[in-house]
Amino acid sequence: MSKYYTVKEGDTLWGISKNYHISVNELAKINSLSGKKNHQLKIGQKIYLEGASGENEKYEVHLKIILMDLAFKPINKAVLKLEFDDKKEIKNVTNGSLDNIEIEDHAKGLKVYIKNIYGEYDLIADHKSLPVGKKVLKLTSRKVKVEGKHYAKDGILQQTLSGIKRDLQAIGKPILDGIGSVFDSGSKKINTTSKKDVPQMPDQKNEQRRTDAGNSTHIVATQFTEDNFLLNPVNTKYRAYIISAAKRHGFAPQALAALINAEAARKKGGEWNEKSYNNGSKAGGMTQFLPSTWLEMSKNKSSLVGQHVAKNPKLKTQQILDLRFNAEMSIDAAAAYAVYNFKISKLPYQNLTEPSSMAKFAYLLHHEGAGGGRQFVQNSFSQERAKNLLFSQIQNNKSATNYLKRFNNDAKAAYGNWLRNYIDTHINVYDYVVDIKKTTGKSLSLDETIKQLKGTSVAAPQPKSLNTQTKKTEDTSRSSNNTVNSQSVGGSNKWHDPLDVCKLRTAGLASAKAATFGKVRNGGTKNHQGIDLQANPGTTIYAVCSGTVRLAENSNGAYGYIVVIQVKIDDLPESQKLYAKSKLNTSEFIYFFYAHLSQIDVHKGDPIDVGGKLGKTGSSGNANGMTTILKGAHLHFEARSAINLGVGLVGRIDPMPFLSVKLVY
């Protein structure tokens, strides 16, 4: 039996955390709270104070499902049937996703069905096994095309007829940015397109949908989907490059797209980032080539970069490395490098005929290297190396140890299963197919691929005893005699400055005043939307108050790596609360924004305690080159009324009055 606290007026999760000396994260896990639920406690709600560790440890997979339609738009309302852990569950999708799906046995896999307009369930995902840990599964349903009204009646997807026609016309519109690339001044243009690469008119696409007034309407539209190849609309500008590279190197474009998607850093909305660069590993470009590998590919005459370097022998090393950020060359190099790895792996890759197998084998060799990939296929690597790889990938020692036990401490079998599941989950060529009926429909697993390569299978995990008893929303099974404390515990009401030492930046500015909030730049003509606190890169940043992480990502813009935390204004200490309410009198929440970071230690949706470590300062975004305080290194810190805001000062307030120290300028 577990003790619980009954929520009273004025209580917050942070206050309960402080009173019972249990971290907010622990309370959130015990009570299955995430995101806004951390703030939206209800009077009379039971907050359980025990049972987190046992409950959390029994689940091997914590899954979030994001559901999209054929045009890669979120399906905001749908009914799914999930099959896992020898049970079936019906779930309603809202806002395009399902959160907190907890799976006890990864080895039993997952099937996902979507309810169609006839009340039947169509299979949209079938994973024989799953990778352990926290995962996001993005599913694309070809059964649904969304726009307009949704679910006017239970189980019915209703759309306007004109909306469907507009959508199909938009999908059918060819989007082909000019093939060929323009390099920096002094470089030549490369045009790899031949007349054969011009898209041809494929078969018509037929769709049946419920439309206005619930009538069933048959829609016919022609689509430009060369080679039955589908891309997220935000990536269609790379379409011609992928098709050309695939033809040059003997790949299916769908296989090459799946490989690119697994490697590429992505902007908001899923767009591949051709300018991506990892400061730690030095990997760069859309397909994330390391400097040494890219220089190796620049000598490979089968690749575009190799051909370009051969024609321009005076290019310096840095100029060659900068070619990684050219999308056409990066895409082509990914295909050329895959073929190169196939050949030097000394494995019978000629046996692979299915695009799914080719993509998965290419990713395996990219992940492990040609030599390591061969050892993986033949299961010839050492137990010690396998264990080191397993623990480095899972990262949580306790989870990795429990996972290893399921394989009788055979690290080779454990890592072999882990990587098979990981690659099978991350590489799906059918995400890039318009009409699956025009293909073989086969999606070979990595294990099936390894068998075709004359490799060795590994042992399956031991069966896990499951507790399939349904978890009740209203917990009536717990004793009502375990309530504690009849007094309200309130909120956290604590503040912690964002840095241990807060001092305004002066380096690179006319004065310290230019580091404050408002029209303080360029002689009072330019806005500064927050304050700049001087800090050498690597300085720890803290949550100023208890709240929830709403963003933790690379902004791919001027701010670089950022964290945004959401705080309930009533959770602020009295003086900060009064100031916030005077400026944001209609808001329930305030958002604190941290920018130019080098390291992020939290994830979106995490509850965070006041003083909790969020990450470290850095020089990302337009602070690039500010590597010391003397060179202008700083934390950019804002107070906002919303997570995302535009330019100017609208929605922002001066964060300086929140600080516990008075800053001099």
Image: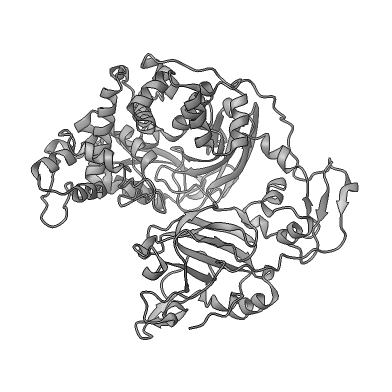
Drawn side of residue 236 relative to residue 581, left or right: left
> Is residue 280 in view?
yes
Drawn side of residue 37 relative to residue 519, left or right: right
Residue 569 x/y as whole percent: 65, 70
Q: Is the residue 602 above or below the residue 64 in the image?
A: below
User: Which residue occupies 39% across, 45% down?
Assistant: 71
User: Which residue occupies 36% across, 84% down?
Assistant: 525
- In the image as oriented, which residue stretches furthest toward the bottom? 523
Drawn side of residue 253 relative to residue 182, left or right: right
Residue 410 x/y as whole percent: 56, 21
Asked where in the image residue 17 lies, by quadrant, the reply is bottom right
- In the image as oriented, which residue stretches furthest toward the top? 454
Residue 405 x/y as whole percent: 62, 25
Count of residue discs: 0
Residue 561 x/y as whole percent: 44, 58
Asked where in the image residue 242 lies, by quadrant, the reply is top left
Q: Nearer the viewer, residue 23 or 2?
A: 23
